[in-house]
Amino acid sequence: MRVSKNIKSARVLITGGYGFLGHHLCTRLKDQGWKWVGRFHSAQYDFTEKKDVMTCFKQVMPDVVVHLAAKCGGIGANMANPADFWRENLLMGVHTMEACADIGAKLIMVGTTCSYPKLAELPFDEDDIFNGYPEPTNAPYGIAKRSLLVGAQAFYKQYGLKCAYLIPTNMYGEFDNFDPQTSHVIPAMIRAFHDAKKKDIKEVVLWGDGSPTRDFMYAGDCAVAIETAMIHFAAPMPINLGTGIQTSIRSLAEMVAQIVGYKGDITWDKGKPNGQPLRALKTELARQVLGWSAQTKLYEGIQKTYAWYLSSQG
């Protein structure tokens, strides 16, 4: 990396910078005094096209790149568009990696817990990421992200690419996607319960049976971990980011309903898929190498998220 004396004077490029996590990261970097942080809308540069990536890098000449751009969504979106999820995520990651290697920029790549095997032993250990096939409903997305870890390690070995690879657990927070067709579970529940409350609907039907567990992390905590890796870490080993706490989907639904103030019934459609049955991350490595741990409690984080959602509705 070209900037060494004062890392916060580095030219930082964030792909997906106007997305959910991108908003949180840009806010964090601005608050922490980073001097130059660049981001762009996908309409400006299509990172599935190599020529657009090269044009962007030539114009920005970044010292540090945080690759957040991704095609992502909930179970329904993954099941409906598996080829798109595999192809677009793989291409965006490969093109970004190549461009960073070409100019000597440091790369922070963000992976996904969907890369872990469906039946991996809990909590998920970084050493087990290749020990089985992911949950089929989102395997194309998870495999694409897993392949980018292999690519980062290969580029590190062959070209000396400075790269960190972070695997955040399920995230939520302000700026999330609340579209019922493509959103993840927390924003989807917030939207469903809010709409039902507003329209006085007596029942909300949710997918599955509520038994799967997830580790939910506030996106602002993830932004802190990314900034830490930008400053202190540059080896392409997978590092889990999470709270280490498992919450069942049923318990989550009850929590969200309480926060939103929905008093109706919650019904589970057991004919719909549950997704991966259990998911929680081992987080010791993040504490060891980054000195980081998640700070925001789930109830507090959902309260913040719902308050933002209300304000975004005008």
Image (cartoon, rainbow, N blue to C red):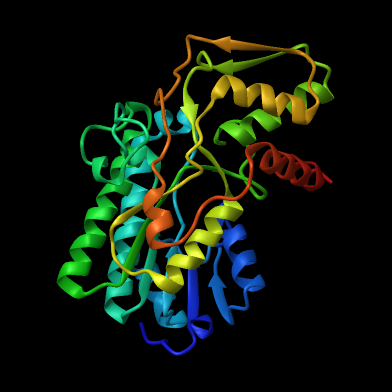
**Which residue is at the far bottom?**
5
Q: Residue at x 30, y 32 (%)?
A: 134
Quadrant of the rendering where the N terminus is positioned: bottom left
Q: Is residue 166 visible?
A: yes
Percent position (x, y) of residue 300? 70, 41
Determine whether, in the image, residue 20 is placed left or right of residue 138.
right
Q: Is residue 42 visible?
A: no
**Which residue is at the far left?**
158
Percent position (x, y) of residue 207? 54, 18
Percent position (x, y) of residue 57? 40, 76
Q: Residue at x 27, y 74 (%)?
A: 101
Determine whether, in the image, residue 65 is placed left or right of residue 190.
left
Percent position (x, y) of residue 242? 48, 45
Q: Nearer the viewer, residue 283 or 260?
A: 283
Vertical side of 310 occupied by 48: above or below: below
Q: Nearer the viewer, residue 14 or 123?
A: 123
Q: Residue at x 43, y 66 (%)?
A: 229
Q: Residue at x 27, y 78 (%)?
A: 102
Vertical side of 78 occupied by 89: above or below: below
Number of numbered discs on residues: 0
Vertical side of 169 occupied by 237: above or below: below
Determine whether, in the image, residue 161 is placed left or right of residue 188.
left
Q: Nearer the viewer, residue 54 or 101?
A: 101
